[in-house]
Amino acid sequence: MAPAETAGRTVFCAKLKQELPGLDAPPWPGALGQRVYEHISREAWELWEERMKMILNEYRLLPFQKEAQQLIATQMEEFLFGEGDATPPEYTPGH
């Protein structure tokens, strides 16, 4: 049985500005995934996943396309660590 190193793991969430349960593993490859793992809570990641679905639908992107992955990485960084909310400019709620 693997040691429960991540059980009860918390992070000070850069998005929600409070100490919250962290993710179990980096959710994205590379340095950005590691940064998210170290500084973003599970709750903020779930908010991002909802936003990511909206962005993929709005831009009509497929997650496996390289261009989509680059756009998503940029939007993810802005949503989780930036001041903006990463909403596509032409997005209108309820649309």
Image (cartoon, rainbow, N blue to C red):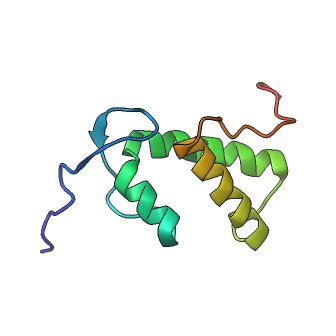
**View extreme (right): residue:** 90
| Rendered position, 73 above or below 81 | below
Q: Name which residue lies at 35% across and 63% down.
A: 25
On the picture, is 41 further left or further right than 75? left
On the picture, is 43 further left or further right than 62? left
Q: Name which residue lies at 38% across and 45% down.
A: 42
* Residue 76 coordinates in the image, percent (x, y): 60, 51
* Residue 73 coordinates in the image, percent (x, y): 63, 59
The C terminus appears in which quarter of the rendering? top right
* Residue 26 coordinates in the image, percent (x, y): 41, 64
Q: Name which residue lies at 87% across and 35% down.
A: 90
The N terminus appears in which quarter of the rendering? bottom left
**View extreme (front): residue:** 83
Q: Name which residue lies at 31% across and 49% down.
A: 22
| Rendered position, 70 above or below 16 | below
Residue 14: image quadrant is: top left
